[in-house]
Image (tube, rainbow, N blue to C red):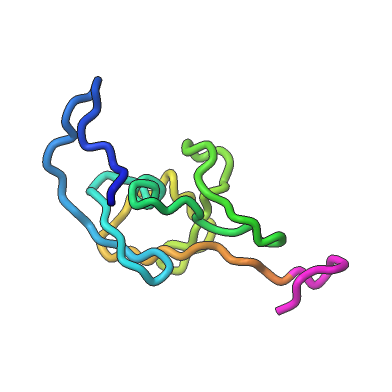
Amino acid sequence: MSQRIDHHPVLGSLGDRKQLSFHYNDSVYMAYEGETIAGALLAAGVRTLRVHEEKGTPRGIYCNIGHCYECRVHVDGIPTVRACMTLVQEGMQVNAGSLLPTPLKKGGHHA
């Protein structure tokens, strides 16, 4: 079930918009043209966009204006793309960041 706002009490109806499909972690999601990756995933009920690189704790949308970098994802093979600032494109491949090896820290994870 979509959690997308289609009619806003102040802005009114968002009208007819072109639908796009994109992939996030090997699943297909729907977005509307002009929508950000973060907005489309949030509307689809996805709250975790990546995990902390060292701790593995979930991360998602925090500021939603491009300042905090908590929504970093990989887009079409490019790492560290802010989901809140990047518009969905048809067929886009989006993947969450993952736990990385930290061999130089005591008790770190090893690949």
In magenta, the rendered stretch is 102-111
User: Please, which residue is most extreme toward the top here?
Assistant: 10
In front of the other: 81 or 49: 49
Q: Quadrant of the C terminus?
A: bottom right
The answer to whether 76 appears left or right of 35 in the picture is: right
In front of the other: 2 or 13: 2
Q: Residue at x 49, y 58 (%)?
A: 73
**Image quarter of residue 62:** top right
In the image, is residue 45 above or below residue 68? below
Q: Residue at x 44, y 44 (%)?
A: 84
- Residue 67 at what x, y percent from top left? 55, 38
Indicate whether residue 39 is drawn in magenta: no
- Residue 89 at what x, y percent from top left? 29, 57
- Residue 22 at what x, y percent from top left? 30, 62
Q: How many marks?
A: 0
Q: Residue at x 88, y 67 (%)?
A: 106
User: Please, which residue is most extreme toward the right here?
Assistant: 106
Principal secondary structure, stretch drawn in magenta: loop
- Residue 92 at what x, y percent from top left? 33, 63
The answer to whether 28 appears left or right of 19 in the picture is: right
